[in-house]
Amino acid sequence: MHPAADPLATPKDAVGRGSPIPLEVVADDDAVIRRFADDMLAEYAAARAAGRAKVVFILPVGPVGQFDLVADRCNARGISLADLVVINMDEYLTPDGRDFIPTSDPLSFRRHMDDHFYARLDPALAPPPDQRLFPDPRDLDGVPRAIAAHGGVDVCFGGIGITGHVAFNDPPEPGEETTLAAFRDLPTRVVSLSRETRLINSVTTSRGNVDRIPRLAVTVGMREILASRKVRIYMNRQWQSAQVRKILHGPVTAAVPASLLQQHPDVRFVVAAHVTELPEPQLR
């Protein structure tokens, strides 16, 4: 497929058409979250049925809401997730980059996972603590070791950031040169977050208080994401209208990190209908 001349001009009813990435459009934000929860349980069951001793998921914190649904369904139906290995995509770090922000911080992704997933699950059904992993700035090889020990990642679930990033794999900064091959091979690492990422995260979490958003984070790399057997992406933010067009219909480029998913053999996007609206200006 040749990239569109101007991906941002792709009409609403043509988003996804002709793209190598299959796209499913659902009604609204709630439908995206329900589909995310449905897919988590379905993919877990499929991997277990295929004989996987441990099922390995890479999971994001955003979008939010799916973990509450999965926990409630597991509790109601007695579904055990004892064989699930959860590798969270990323976490904010202290200013020196040596440690996680504390779980007392409302921005902590570890806190979110505890509050909305692990503590909500019946303990008899929950993944054991040693199967709940975050990339760790003190042991950056920990995630790759765990992935190798369990025979690879079954599914990488995710959302898309304002820069087109997956996890905190922001594109190169202006003037920073990299090859597509080098970007594709970026490992789990400590990163400085782009100004765009910090700004939009302040809008969605802190009422625009960008000073409250940490400058450093630890993230799984493009290497781990692209090596996953399946990738499933969910989008329900109004500001994703531009990036979904660049990712689906633009060139494969490090400037739009998720565009590399065009080359993945088993990927699917699920988006709310409003995400397909044209990203055109409106003064209000």
Image: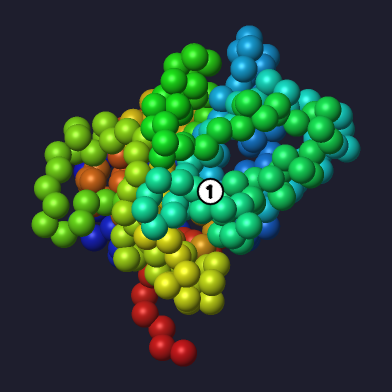
Q: Secondary structure at mark 1?
A: strand
Asked if one can make out residue 79 in the rendered structure from this viewpoint, the answer is no
Q: Percent x, y for residue 198?
A: 40, 64
Question: Which residue is farthest top?
Answer: 51
Rendering quarter of residue 137: top left
Q: Percent x, y for residue 164?
A: 35, 53
Q: Percent x, y for residue 51?
A: 63, 9
Out of 222 and 210, give the one closest to the viewer: 210
* Residue that appears at 59% across and 60% down: 105
Q: Is residue 50 left or right of residue 248?
A: right
Q: Residues within 10 Å of mark 1 (few under 14, many from 20)?
A: many
Q: Is residue 237 above or below residue 80?
A: below
Question: Which residue is farthest bottom?
Answer: 284
Out of 32 and 78, give the one closest to the viewer: 78
Asked if one can make out residue 230 in the rendered structure from this viewpoint, the answer is yes
* Residue that appears at 48% across and 76% down: 208
Out of 203 and 5, give the one closest to the viewer: 203
Q: Is residue 125 above or below residue 192?
A: above
Q: Which residue is mark 1?
A: 234
- How many numbered dots are placed on residues in this image? 1
* Residue that appears at 60% across and 21% down: 55
Instruction: Say which amino acid is labelled 1.
Output: Tyr
Q: Is residue 106 left or right of residue 81?
A: left
Out of 142 and 57, give the one closest to the viewer: 142
Q: Percent x, y for residue 207?
A: 53, 76
* Residue that appears at 49% across and 14% down: 149
Which of the image's four quarters has the N terminus? top left
Colour convention: rainbow
